[in-house]
């Protein structure tokens, strides 16, 4: 989400357009929803672009990462099977030879079997990534051909031991492969498949001569997916990355927002003293609305937690963002106990499910336009409950 939007575009991607599409839209069924939910949460009423998405939108976080190792085609496929409206495919990081691949972070020791490859033992190193000393293996030190010899593994096995069953099954996707996969899945499923890629650590990579935005734009242009109605939403935690993209493509753009006291790394590098708290003021949101169509805040920016981990009172962020025409897609809903507000946990087991339906209901009631989730099937059922209440 960045600066390259006309007033008309801002209006058409605003809250009213999205809610109108959801409330008035009938027709296309959403996979997995009961028939009674279709009228409210169906895929729009013949419109295109963001306004064609259901509200609340279910966004498969790195695919269906509650059930498969994240950022694999196994995870992406399953997210669609489970009813996700949009798939976050993927977090984009570069290889040494300039290709974009999908990994949660450039450090791949926790998401691939690279440690089992003795030929890459010498690549293990320590780098400072956005001010944090990080040890491991980094995508920018590998060619694409080398990365293709690796296989994905579960990132948080303590919470998802069942996912380790799939360790080693899938390779690392490239962004170009994702764009081809999107077209294939759209044909197969008879509905438009949406994706929601993110530029990861763009300032860090630009300093290495591996700028992300130009590479993203080149591929989107190659596949004809760089227009305002294209089914590709671009996101970044660095506002200047979104501003660069806004000059290169016409896609819908979203600024991701971490904790209120944090500073985007591009702000740190530029000496900009502002924090996320400044960006979510009415003034900050108006500025974002000048170059973006939405924000992706943490759920805690929508409803802060009390000292005991229970939910407090909702903030005014939803209303403030909607007032300037921005949509909100907060992150991330997960089913397991440690990731849920305290009142929705069941027992103490870190790999056990709590009551995500109760949590979804509470977050949906704030008026958010969608949510990132590791468990798309749970979210689809929770949405059906919410719109039929």
Image (cartoon, grey):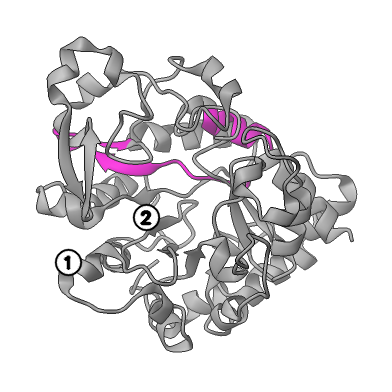
Q: Residue furthest bottom?
A: 283
Along the horizontal axis of the image, is 305 left or right of 259? Answer: right
Along the horizontal axis of the image, is 281 left or right of 362? Answer: left
Along the horizontal axis of the image, is 117 left or right of 226? Answer: left
Check if mark 2's residue and mark 1's residue have beta carbons within 8 Å: no
Whether residue 28 appears in this view of the structure is: no
Provide residue 266's location: percent of width, then percent of height: 23, 65
| Residue closest to the eye, 342 or 313 | 342
Q: Is residue 382 above or below residue 257?
A: above
Residue at horizontal 16 percent and vertical 72 percent from the top: 270
Task: Tell me if residue 80 is in the magenta stretch.
Answer: yes
Provide residue 141's location: percent of width, then percent of height: 15, 31
Quadrant (top left, top right, bottom left, bottom right) of the C terminus: bottom right
Q: Is mark 1 on a helix, strand or loop?
A: helix
Q: Quadrant of residue 175?
A: top left
| Residue closest to the eye, 339 or 105 | 339
| Residue closest to the eye, 39 or 77 | 77
Residue 187 - label: none
Q: What element carries label 2?
A: loop
Q: How far apart are marks 2 and 1 (CA)?
A: 29 Å
Q: Residues within 10 Å of mark 1 (few under 14, many from 20)?
A: few
Quadrant (top left, top right, bottom left, bottom right) of the N terminus: bottom left
The magenta region covers 75-101
Q: Nearer the viewer, mark 2 or mark 1?
A: 1
Provide residue 345's location: percent of width, then percent of height: 72, 47
Q: Mark 2 points at which residue?
A: 226
Q: Is residue 5 above or below residue 110?
A: below
Q: Name the residue under label 1.
A: 269
């Amino acid at each position: 989400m960045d600066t390259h939007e006309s007033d008309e575009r801002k209006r058409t991607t605003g809250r009213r357009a999205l809610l109108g599409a959801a409330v008035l839209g009938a027709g296309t069924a959403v996979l997995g929803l009961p028939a009674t939910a279709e009228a409210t949460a169906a895929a729009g009423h013949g419109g295109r672009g963001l306004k064609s998405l259901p509200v609340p939108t279910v966004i498969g976080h790195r695919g269906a990462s509650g059930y498969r190792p994240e950022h694999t085609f196994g995870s992406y496929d399953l997210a669609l099977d489970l009813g996700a409206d949009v798939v976050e495919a993927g977090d984009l990081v570069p290889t040494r030879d300039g290709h974009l691949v999908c990994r949660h972070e450039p450090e791949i020791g926790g998401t691939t079997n690279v440690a089992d490859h003795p030929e890459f033992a010498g690549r293990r190193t320590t780098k400072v990534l956005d001010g944090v000393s990080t040890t491991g293996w980094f995508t920018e030190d590998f060619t694409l051909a080398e990365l293709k010899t690796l296989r994905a593994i579960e990132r948080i096995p303590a919470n998802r031991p069942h996912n380790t069953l799939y360790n080693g099954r899938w390779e690392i996707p490239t962004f170009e492969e994702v764009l081809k996969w999107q077209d294939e899945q759209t044909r197969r499923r008879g509905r438009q498949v949406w994706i929601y890629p993110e530029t990861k650590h763009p300032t860090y990579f630009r300093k290495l001569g591996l700028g992300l935005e130009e590479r993203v734009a080149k591929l989107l242009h190659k596949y004809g997916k760089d227009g305002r109605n294209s089914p590709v939403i671009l996101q970044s935690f660095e506002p200047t990355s979104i501003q660069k993209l806004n000059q290169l493509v016409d896609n819908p753009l979203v600024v991701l927002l971490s904790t209120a006291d944090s500073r985007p790394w591009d702000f740190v590098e530029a000496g900009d003293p502002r924090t996320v708290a400044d960006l979510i003021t009415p003034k900050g949101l108006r500025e974002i609305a000048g170059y973006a169509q939405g924000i992706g805040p943490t759920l805690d920016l929508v409803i802060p937690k009390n000292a005991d981990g229970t939910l407090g009172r909702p903030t005014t962020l939803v209303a403030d963002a909607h007032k300037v025409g921005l949509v909100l897609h907060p992150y991330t809903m997960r089913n397991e106990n440690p990731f849920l507000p305290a009142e929705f946990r069941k027992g103490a087991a870190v790999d056990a499910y709590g009551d995500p339906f109760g949590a979804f209901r509470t977050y949906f009631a704030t008026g958010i336009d969608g949510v990132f989730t590791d468990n798309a099937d749970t979210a689809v059922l929770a949405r059906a409950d919410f719109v039929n209440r």
